[in-house]
Image (cartoon, helix red, strand yellow):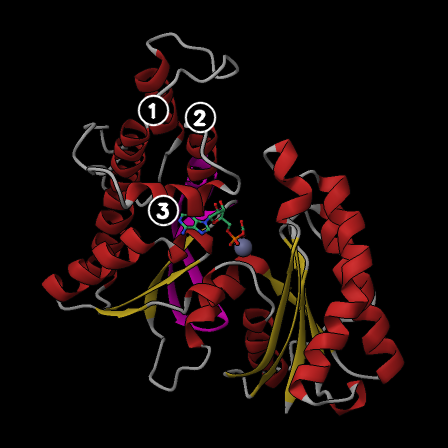
Amino acid sequence: MPILGIETSCDETCAAVVEDGRRVRASVVASQVDLHRKYGGVVPEIASRAHLEALVPVIDEALAEAGLAADALEAVAVVHRPGLIGSLLLGLAAAKTLAWVEEKPLLGIDHVESHIYAACLERTAPVFPCVALVVSGGHTSLYRCDGPLEQTRLGATTDDAAGEAFDKVAALLGLPYPGGPSIDAAAAHGSPRAVPFSRPWLDREAFDFSFSGVKTAVLYHVRGQGADAKRRRTALSEAEVADVAASFQECVVDVLVGKTVRAADACGLDRVVLGGGVAANRRLRERMQQAAEEVGLDLVLPEPRFCTDNAAMVAGLACHRLRAGRVDALDLEARA
Ligand code: KG4
Ligand code: ZN
């Protein structure tokens, strides 16, 4: 039976219809990138207002693409944590309204858990048990996952998330917003060995991460020791920008791949899953693939469109919560 998913935790208004937790019948994503570009980052108030305008058309489009009327849905699922509070409230209000009017069960979904679940979409081979690396704009965490609803966190970033570091380094280098895909594109023309940024915490046994130092290292490399992040960018040639982008990216990828492989070994698991926007990064995918082949790990890489924020992962995970009877009441709250 089809479940409608709604995702509005940050700056993308998303709705999707997923059947049996895996088959994606529709996945609609309305990006707000154009609205936030001139500010160089997501402005929460603007994000909330844009969700308000986009939500009904996006839900209508998802239902139309799936060829369904709302009364044919089995349930309505929505991300209610974590995220920008105003953005979450909009999605939650829409989901509650639909669930109430159509008399369907409401399922509240955790955004990070849904990023892990993205690996299950359109896949028939097993995904669990596995070690999952979630790398997004807000999170960099490693989990041991014994099932879609059973995660144990092994470690997480103690400061910046990997995606946040990508975005800030891109801004420093004068690359266009949003930064992650810009670094990915610029790095393709540079040398990953041009600047030997030190690999933060790679040799520590714990599964925690830290990316704020490498961001500062890029700043000092570009503008000199003691530089102020607010000062204007020093002119770098296109080739120099590509080299710094590739070297920064390689540094982050080394740490992510190294810790993930070690976590799989520590847990005695031979399957690894990636999720979150940074999992769309081509170099990370390539290096993870190489590492998995070297040590004999089964690697599950979601399609890039299911790595960045989307509602298919939300509707998919909701199927398991519904089967487990973990339904929410209409007083479900949003958590920032
Ligand atoms: O999962 P996501 O769409 O939203 C959050 O939950 O945060 O992740 C967004 C993050 C942003 O920081 C964005 O720059 C990064 O994912 N990202 C990438 C790429 N595509 C998106 N980072 C590196 N390479 C990419 N190709
Ligand atoms: Zn996300």
Residue located at (68% from left, 77% from top): 62
SS type, badge 2:
helix
Q: Quadrant of residue 297?
A: bottom left
> Residue 30: which numbered mark, if any?
none
The amino acid type, in three-letter code, at marker 2 is: Leu
The answer to which of marks 1 and 2 sits earlier in the sequence is 2
Q: Could you classify mark 2 by the number of other residues whose Cα lies within 10 Å: few (under 14), some (14-19), or many (20 or more)?
A: many
Q: Is residue 272 left or right of residue 203?
A: right
Front one among 32 and 14:
32
The residue carrying mark 3 has its beta carbon less than 8 Å from ligand 1? no
| Residue topped by disc 1 | 218
Q: Secondary structure at mark 1?
A: helix
- Residues under labels 1 and 2: Cα distance? 8 Å
Is residue 322 highlighted in magenta? no
Expressed as whole percent of the image width and height from the top left, the position of residue 269 reads 24, 68
Of the numbered discs in the image, which one, if any, rests on residue 185?
3
**Going by the image, does 183 lie left or right of 196?**
right
Give how far across and how far down residue 104 sits, in percent: 79, 83
> Which is more foreground, mark 1 or mark 2?
2
**Type of amino acid at the residue the image marks with label 3:** Ala
Q: Which residues are magenta?
A: 138-165
Residues tagged 1 and 2 counted as in contact (Cβ below 8 A):
yes
- Position of 111 relative to 298 (above/below): above
Is residue 75 in view from this perspective?
no
User: Mark 2 or mark 3: which is in front?
Assistant: 3
- Give the labeled residue for mark 2: 172
Mark closest to the chain's N terminus, 1 or 3: 3
What's the residue at 21%, 65% (across, down)? Answer: 268
